[in-house]
Image: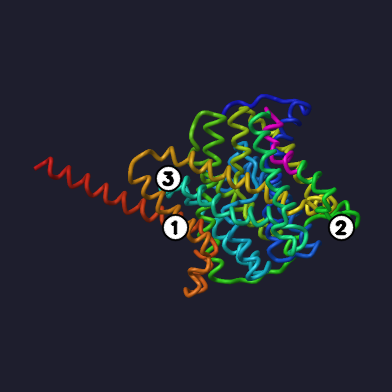
Amino acid sequence: MSTEKKLSIGEAIPLSFQHLLAMFVGTIVPPILIAGAIGATMDQRIALIQAALFVSAIATFIQLFPIPLFGKYKLGSGLPMMMGMSYVFLGLTVAVAKDQGLPVLFGSLLVALVVGFFLGFVVEKVKKIFTPLISGVLVICMGIGLYPSAVRNLASGIKPENYGDPKNIFIGLLVVFIIALLNKLGKGMIKNASIVIGMIVGYLIAIPLGMVDFSNIAAANWFSIPKPMAYGFEFDLGTIITFTIAYVISIISLLGCGTVTTFGAYGRPLTGEEITNSSLAMGLGSVIAALFGSIPMAGLTQNAAIVSINKKTEKIIFVLASLMVLITSVSPKIASCLISIPNSVIGGGTLVIFGMITISGMGLLTRAGDSEYIKLIAGISIAISIGITYNPTMFSKFSPTIQTLIGKSSLISGVIVAIILQGIFGFIDKYQKEKELKLNKM
């Protein structure tokens, strides 16, 4: 790693705030969507948002400050990475929360993530499976699979009967266009904060239109520490298996984030130790997340992109950003303000986020090459994923485990197909090369 220069607090704060803005919306969206799926009470909504922010800060600290275990293994890579919600799990966790409840969601996550933590010790040995092809398919399927959720929110109002109201669609699309224009015309922090600014403008315009409910803000406390095991734990074997497979897939996402960081900041790929130690840190952070009632952790690619642009890797930047996140996590008052954001504003912001996720996946896919077999594998995998996204009941006559594994996560089905086809094609290529060598020797 390069030698870090010392920054003053005054120099570091604007850079830290930039990282806070980049990760904030992406961190609060998952708990808001889960709360909406289960018809959560106001206290539950506040607790879910607090937990998401709290564990994101804790997981970032673990990643920044490695804790020695044994031999070469450490909890944390020391890389300048912000940690937050794993969108690999988003569609799946929303579906499980809606169909089976929060105790099954967090109980099954806990078991799967303990298993996932120990997988961190062997991830370096199987990294060759996680090619740019698989990473690209993963990110594309993840983005596309979340589109229906964003569009549903964009059309939603305060009450179910307001669904499809022209006001909702107007506000949602306005947020989308503001974000797009800020990305085109803005520079520096304005550009990086475009999603936050777009949602703030949408929020302010929604107030006089009667789309914002302030009734719960005044009653909320200023200070409250998130509580672990608040929902109890129940366990479902099929859900545990599904979450375990999803966690393996989420490691691909982490490696992608780490690669963006190291290439952008240091001009080199991830080392073997960084792969292992960052995976262990993500695993521990994810276990803590399940204990506190949040979805698993991931490295945040949007923050990695900031690092690759400004080349600022000093730890004080990320420590201050994490402290800012931690402060917001212990205030129900702040959480209740976030809950008052209209669904249509959330929908507009997330539509842009999910679209950007998809496009970043296409960028990863270009690194896989331009061969016909790459296009074929990607095309088949993405087509299957999209098909399942818009036809989730097609597995209704299969076993509950298959329904949970594939029917509730089109992302998993797309990645599994890509891995299988990559393995088959790789075996065929190897066989053909060996056959040619034998013929040449004859």
Q: Earlier in the sequence, mark 2 or mark 1?
A: 2
* Residue in the image at 33% along x and 44% along y: 372
Q: What amino acid is at disc 2?
A: Asn
Q: What amino acid is at disc 1?
A: Ile
* Residue in the image at 73% along x and 47% along y: 171
Q: Is residue 125 visible in this depiction of the protein?
A: no
Disc number for residue 133:
3
Is the residue 406 above or below the residue 24 in the image?
below
Q: What amino acid is at disc 3?
A: Leu
Q: Is residue 192 magenta?
A: yes
Q: Position of residue 63 (x, y in %)?
A: 63, 43
Distance of mark 2 from mark 1, alpha carbons? 43 Å
* Residue in the image at 55% along x and 40% along y: 258
Disc number for residue 4:
none
Q: Position of residue 99 (x, y in %)?
A: 63, 70
Residue stretch in magenta: 187-199
Query: Which secondary structure is most common in the magenta stretch?
Result: helix
Disc number for residue 384:
1
- Nearer mark to the viewer, of 3 and 1: 1
Q: Earlier in the sequence, mark 2 or mark 3?
A: 3
Residue beneath disc 2: 216
Question: Is the N terminus in the top left, top right, bottom left or bottom right quadrant?
Answer: top right
